């Protein structure tokens, strides 16, 4: 499922690999997460209104996604220091990845050069590393994550 602009990535293709630091400064490599579904939530900025609402909604749905075996990662250009403070302030139970140069966002065709930040994109990757579900939203429109649990079920 896609919404918004046509994307260069597509359901069924291998998910572009990346290595980014999490909020603790530890490296996370996407290809090393195979064996379970992965949900990537690209968002614009820590501490911004729409993004905070979305990430707190995911926090509230997190136990259901975990019960389905999913690994969940938020991805933005903010530093791992910013992510650590943001995660603590909002009680986020999942990791936030620091895409400080926008390399992952560019690989997933969600980088906005004018904002120098990622646009809203949710990607569900199956246990074998293929893209199972995509939803892209306009920058000022919050995502509806209600279909993500079903996408995770299909990706496991």
Image (tube, grey):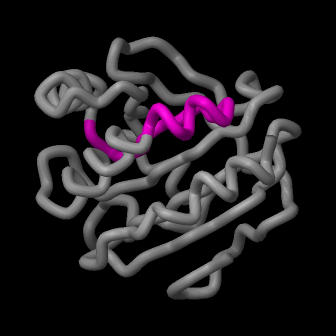
Q: Residue at x 52, y 38 (%)?
A: 64
Spot occupied by residue 115 in the image (x, y as percentages of width and height): 26, 68
Spot occupied by residue 91 in the image (x, y as percentages of width and height): 22, 27
Q: Is residue 76 left or right of residue 155?
A: left
Q: Is residue 2 left or right of residue 36?
A: left
> Is there any visible trace of residue 55 in the rendered image?
yes
Closer to the camera, 84 or 93? 93
Q: Is residue 136 left or right of residue 127?
A: left
Closer to the camera, 130 or 78? 130
Specify the quadrant of the image occupied by residue 83. Answer: top left
Closer to the camera, 142 or 101? 142
Q: Is residue 90 magenta?
A: no
Q: Quadrant of the N terminus?
A: bottom right
Which span of residues is magenta-colored?
62-78
Instruction: Tell me how many marks there are.
Output: 0
> Is there any visible trace of residue 111 in the rendered image?
no
Q: Is residue 67 magenta?
A: yes
Q: Residue furthest bottom?
A: 5
Q: Residue at x 80, y 40 (%)?
A: 156
Specify the quadrant of the image occupied by residue 94. Answer: top left
Spot occupied by residue 36 in the image (x, y as percentages of width and height): 76, 30
Spot occupied by residue 124 in the image (x, y as percentages of width and height): 66, 52
In the image, is residue 128 above or below residue 22?
A: below
In the image, is residue 105 above or below residue 100?
A: below
Q: Residue at x 56, y 30 (%)?
A: 66
Q: Residue at x 31, y 71 (%)?
A: 142
Closer to the camera, 60 or 129? 60
In the image, is residue 68 above or below residue 1?
A: above
């Amino acid at each position: 499922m896609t919404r918004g602009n046509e994307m260069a990535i597509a359901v069924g293709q291998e998910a572009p690999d990346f290595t980014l630091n999490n909020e603790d400064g530890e490296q996370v490599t996407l290809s090393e997460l195979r064996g379970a579904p992965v949900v990537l939530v690209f968002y614009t900025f820590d501490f911004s209104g729409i993004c905070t609402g979305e990430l707190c909604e995911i926090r509230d749905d997190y136990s259901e996604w975990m019960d389905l075996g999913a690994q969940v990662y938020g991805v933005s250009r903010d530093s791992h220091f910013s992510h650590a403070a943001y995660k603590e302030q909002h009680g986020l139970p999942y990791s936030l990845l620091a895409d400080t140069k926008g390399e992952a966002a560019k690989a997933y065709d969600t980088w906005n050069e004018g904002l120098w930040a990622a646009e809203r994109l949710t990607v569900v990757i199956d246990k074998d590393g293929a893209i199972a579900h995509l939803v892209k939203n306009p920058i000022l429109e919050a995502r509806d994550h209600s279909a993500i649990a079903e996408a995770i079920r299909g990706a496991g």
